[in-house]
Image (cartoon, helix red, strand yellow):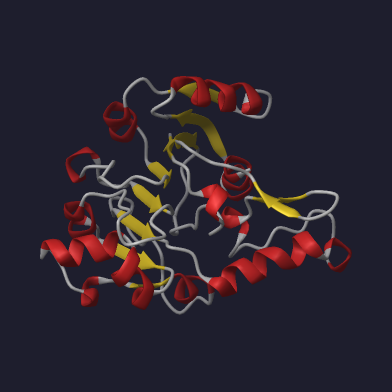
């Protein structure tokens, strides 16, 4: 569902999925194969170097994405660091980024990749460009130059979960095709007959898309426990 939310936001051409357990990556590839060209990455480093959108949703306690792998013009979203011991991005990557956004700085400096980067001494909270709400409200620009490296460090914020829940729980209040622009990439919760459930996630994914003039940091999976089990995704544009 996180993959479909990504597809709803961007004209992607290809998704590449990496997982420590190859069978899980292959299962997701089969599930999405009818919607977009999808393949399994054999090596995470190679996939990161090749693609320009990387979305990481894992429960890792060691950095997965290294700064040296990330080329100019790449956007990286990390959405799996919901507790202090979790980390997905090497601290040097946050220092390398031209723009660094958080969902809530006060939270990411305690729980997110930012927390680990501050502890490593590579930056301070003043290095953060702004918060996700600043982007959504248009108070700050996203990508301004094609060569910028942008990073979104997302730990999950209750108000975002509430915004996601509204069209899920009360579909009659929205047109059938309604997808909130500010929350679509976090819409990984699906309604069931009796309750709302979150699909378990556990991989990185990579995607290829046509060029766009501007790319803004996106959010990842919802902050429910079931969504914190582990994937990066990588997206490539022409």
Residue positioned 84% across, 61% down in the render? 171
Percent coordinates x, y for residue 117 in the rendering: 19, 61
At horizontal 80% and vertical 48% (from top left) the residue drawn is 192
Residue lying farthest to the right in this orientation = 172
Quadrant of the rendering where the N terminus is positioned? top right
Q: Compared with residue 189, is residue 112 higher up or lower down, i.e. above or below? A: below
Task: Return the x and y of residue 190 as percentages of the image width and height.
Answer: 72, 49
Left or right position of 110 against 230: left
Q: Is residue 111 above or below residue 234?
A: below
Q: Is residue 55 left or right of residue 171?
A: left
Pick the front one: 228 or 7: 228
Quadrant of the rendered image containing residue 143: bottom left
174 left or right, relative to 102: right
Query: Disc count in the image?
Result: 0
Residue 72 or 84: which is nearer the viewer? 84
In percent of width and height, residue 66 lies at 22, 42
Seen from this angle, which residue lies furthest left? 121
- Image quarter where the C terminus lies is top left
39, 64: nearer the viewer: 64
Left or right: 24 as drawn, with respect to 169: left
Q: Position of residue 9 (x, y in %)?
A: 59, 50
* Quarter-of-image position of residue 97: bottom left
**Residue occupying the point 51% across, 70% down:** 157
Q: Please tell me whether residue 77 is drawn above or below residue 99 in the rendered image.
A: above
Compare residues 86 and 63 and report the one nearer the observer: 86
């Amino acid at each position: 569902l996180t993959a479909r939310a990504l597809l709803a936001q961007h004209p992607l051409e290809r998704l590449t999925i990496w997982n420590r357990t190859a069978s899980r990556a292959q299962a997701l590839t089969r599930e999405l194969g009818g919607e977009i060209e999808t393949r399994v990455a054999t090596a995470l480093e190679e996939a990161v170097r090749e693609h320009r959108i990387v979305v990481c949703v894992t429960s890792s306690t060691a950095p997965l994405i290294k700064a040296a792998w990330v080329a100019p013009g790449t956007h990286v979203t990390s959405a799996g660091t919901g507790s202090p011991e979790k980390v997905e991005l090497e601290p040097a990557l946050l220092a390398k980024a031209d723009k660094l956004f958080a969902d809530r700085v006060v939270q990411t400096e305690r729980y997110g990749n930012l927390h680990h980067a501050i502890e490593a001494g590579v930056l301070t909270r003043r290095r953060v460009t702004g918060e996700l709400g600043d982007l959504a409200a248009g108070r700050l620009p996203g990508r301004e130059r094609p060569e910028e490296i942008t990073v979104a460090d997302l730990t999950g914020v209750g108000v975002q979960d509430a915004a996601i829940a509204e069209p899920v729980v009360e579909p009659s209040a929205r047109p059938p095709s309604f997808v909130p622009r500010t929350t679509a990439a976090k819409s990984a919760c699906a309604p069931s007959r009796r309750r709302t459930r979150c699909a378990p996630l556990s991989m990185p994914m990579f995607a290829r898309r046509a060029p766009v003039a501007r790319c803004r940091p996106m959010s990842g999976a919802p902050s429910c426990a079931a969504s914190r089990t582990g994937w990066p995704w990588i997206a490539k544009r022409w």
